[in-house]
Image (cartoon, grey):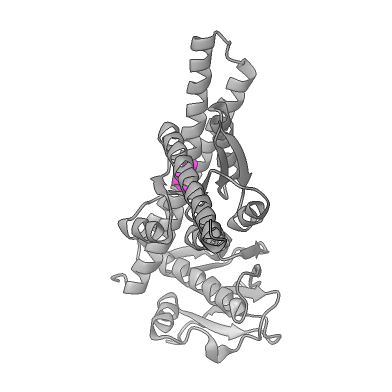
Amino acid sequence: MSEKVLLVDDEKDFLDIMSERMEARGMTVKTAESADQALKILEKESFDAIVMDFKMPGMDGIQALKNIKTRKPELQIILLTGYATVEKTVEAMKIGATDLLEKPADLEALAAKIKQAKAEKMLLVEKKTEDKIKDILKRFGG
Amino acid sequence: MSPSKNDIQFFGTLSAAMTHDMKNCLAIINENAGLLTDLAVKAQDRAIPVDPLKAAIISEKIGKLVARADDMIKRFNRFAHSMDYDKETVDLEEAVDLVARLAERIFRQDRIRLTVIPASAPCRIHASRFALLHLIYRAMDILCRHQAEGTSDIEKPVTVRFGTDPNMPEICFTQDSGPEIKLESLFTSPEDQALLARVNMNIRTMDSGAGFCLNTLPPARE
């Protein structure tokens, strides 16, 4: 099954070329030019992974990461950045980023991280379902 | 004159924004080159010929991106050379244009929508180019922060105009909306005062309270 990815970057040229190359590798890609636009898309659709630029006009990557993780903690977010300082990487990981890649990123490495992110998301969803079932059984004496 | 701590901060801020944009450009060039490789691999593995039109479009895109990156590097180089002389003749319009292009990413991020009205006649001063660039950036920053008071994520329109009196070169910064700008709230810190003194410029506020102008001090009498 193909991975469904939301790609977020303020550079339209980057979105176009990346989505074309990712789709050629069997992924289903949707794009957003800002974090605000991404949040609106996320209200309606679910994704296996979000690949997002760290610095964007308006809401930046860290703020967007916090907002997404508050609303949908199971979502896997891979951040792309021009310069990955140790400080920023630690901050992003603490908030819940799955991974952080430096631009220009190697597409094969990114594709591998997306696959891994999908597997991790599935585990989280399974765990959530299991917890729900356990809770129902507990409450109704199963 | 040795650069101040604020000068270094200004240089760092603009350098970080510029290099970020350069990296973005390289990332897109990298993906276009990758796409050409994808097409070559497909041609070899599945005997699908490379579409010449597609290859030409990709090549054209790469060419445009290289030109964009080259333009950024030229601007950055001009910025780096702004420290070459203690004082030189500087065109105010050129200086505003350079700051606007160097800080494009920062302005975009801060939602500043900049409009520069071209000067009707050359508007030049004799000063440190670097200090003037710093002062222009600081003026934009002050106006942006002033407009952002009480509001967060709104677009901030800023208009820059130039004076018409060749004997008193002037740059005026105006906001379309926002609270009234008062002289006593502008360039009040010792660092800002020192920056104004280095460029030998004065501030005056507009009667409407919509902005302020930076103009040259009248020449000191012998």
Residue B167 visible in rendering: no
Q: For the image shown, how many numbered marks are present on the structure?
A: 0
Residue A98 visible in rendering: yes
First to last magenta residue range: B21-26
Q: Residue at x 52, y 16 (%)?
A: B42
x, y (%) of residue A67? 54, 62
- Does residue B22 belong to the magenta stretch? yes
In the rendered view, would you say B72 is above or below A64? above
Q: Nearer the viewer, residue A99 or B1?
A: A99
Q: Main secondary structure of the magenta part?
A: helix
x, y (%) of residue A8? 56, 48
- The quarter of the image holding the C terminus of chain B is bottom left
x, y (%) of residue B13? 41, 63
In this view, the residue farthest toward the front is A141
Q: Residue at x 44, y 51 (%)?
A: B20
Q: Nearer the viewer, residue A24 or B118?
A: A24
Q: Residue at x 53, y 55 (%)?
A: A142
In the rendered view, would you say B47 is above or below A83? above
Q: Nearer the viewer, residue A47 or A125?
A: A125
